[in-house]
Amino acid sequence: MTEVVSVTRFEDRVAAGQLRVGVIGLGYAGLPLAMAFAEAGFDVSGIDLDAERVRAIGERRSYLVDVPAERYAGLAGTLAASADYDGVGDLDAMTICVPTPLSKTRTPDLTYIVSAAQSVAAQLRPGQLVVLQSTTHPGTTEEIVLPILEEQGGKVGQDFFLGYAPERVDPGNHRFTLRSTPRVVAGVTAECRRRVELLYRQVVDTVIPVSSTMVAETAKLHENTFRAVNIALANELALMCDRLGISSWEVIDAAATKPFAFLPHYPGPGLGGDCIPVVPHFLAWRLREYGYTSVLIDAAHEINAQMPMYVTQKVADALNDAGKPVKGSRLLLLGLAYKADVHDTRESPSLEILRQLRARGADIRYCDPWVPEMDFDGERYESVDFIPEEVEAADCVVVLTAHEAFMERPLWLVAKQVVDTRNVVPDAPGVWRI
Ligand SMILES: NC(=O)c1ccc[n+]([C@@H]2O[C@H](COP(=O)([O-])OP(=O)(O)OC[C@H]3O[C@@H](n4cnc5c(N)ncnc54)[C@H](O)[C@@H]3O)[C@@H](O)[C@H]2O)c1
């Protein structure tokens, strides 16, 4: 490694909007960031192994709810995408936003991070800043990414710079955007952190530096664990209120009138998305190495994981009440996406509910304006229209996702039986709530 871009030069380039920024992994986390840098006037190179995503960007097409095609018209800089790493040597700074799934045994799979880091390392040039943004277990930046980059012979904080800046995107959330959501950042050295801060200040209003990459990694895991545990608390309340014969929703709303020290969370059909159901296990997994067993994370997982079975049982109860078995009954599932007004079905509890009801022999249709078709468990499914005929023909309608399109047309009023997992259907005979 020879010439290093000095911090002054780095700052000058940022100030002049000349910093060349790379975003590796153009999914829910990476693409909005790439867009934000391009909107702020930088020349951005996106890299993604998925040729279809690269093509979509080249053709200015939208494939994510947060990045509609119109946003391409507002770029002050440029956004190009490629399926290879050839241009990495020309970048000044790059962020790695690749997936970090969990195996079936709840072990973190860091192969995407390792592969991306190796591809970057092969082209690493003096002065470059690399920022890991994927959600991962504590220690990943310095124990896994750093050694890969150092194999090139450079020294971190001098020859190249490395940091961590966890993603907080909430797809579909228009209130808290990438810019208005504060960003925690960290660097392996003080100089690394300074550069990470400078980079993110270009696209985020509030940047929060912390003392180490491990603090930043763990803060991200704690945020998601907080949600998983609180949702589990609400779900367990629902299970208890069911036995008491009262509404958990009414209980929570009553409790939420306390103006301090209470943050309402609500029950639902189970956890979904690729964050909340997955991320707490990164923490639990890493801590096992330290001989520590996380009690709350495991307990929350158990409660949340039983919700699809609970919903399935509610459907069976509703049908039973009408003198029908699950087998052969016609069901209409409303919503496959894991939350309202997004396309994402990753880890969606609707899928597990569909699987369980199908295993019991139900005749299932689904309606989801955000998921027009889907291959699942070897079957091809297509969304039916949200029309009175479909609702009336169903022996039971199961409300799983409160999409706006459903809220605007409360067709469940004509349903024979409704199981409502989102508390959106008014009380009436034949309405069952979790
Ligand atoms: N989706 C969210 O709401 C969200 C929120 C916070 C954090 N995160 C985290 O952000 C990270 C990315 O998640 P996502 O939802 O954007 O995933 P995603 O699957 O939508 O996108 C990741 C992209 O990375 C690409 N990719 C995989 N390996 C690659 C490689 N070696 N080089 C280049 N591209 C590669 C994939 O083709 C894919 O397009 C994960 O760690 C996730 O936990 C996601």
Image (cartoon, rainbow, N blue to C red):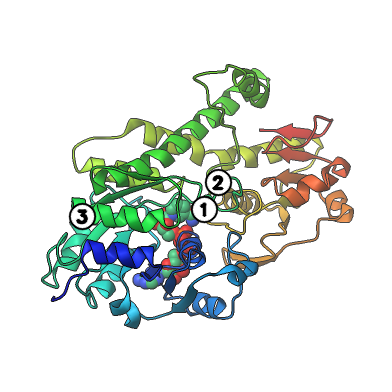
Comparing 306 with 230, the one in front is 230
312 vs 105: above or below: above
Label 2 sits on residue: 176
Label 3 sits on residue: 191
Q: Quadrant of the N terminus?
A: bottom left
Question: Whole-percent x and y of residue 81?
Answer: 46, 77
Q: Is residue 274 visible?
A: no
- Dot 3 alpha-carbon crowd within 10 angstroms: few under 14, some 14 to 19, many 20 or more: some
Question: Whole-percent x and y of residue 196?
Answer: 31, 56
Q: How many marks?
A: 3
For residue 347, the mark is 1
For residue 336, the mark is none
| Label 3 CB-ligand 1 distance < 8 A | no
Is residue 358 found left or right of 85 in the rendered image? Answer: right
Is residue 109 found left or right of 379 in the rendered image? Answer: left
Q: Mark 3 and 1 residues: CB-CB less than 8 Å, in contact?
A: no
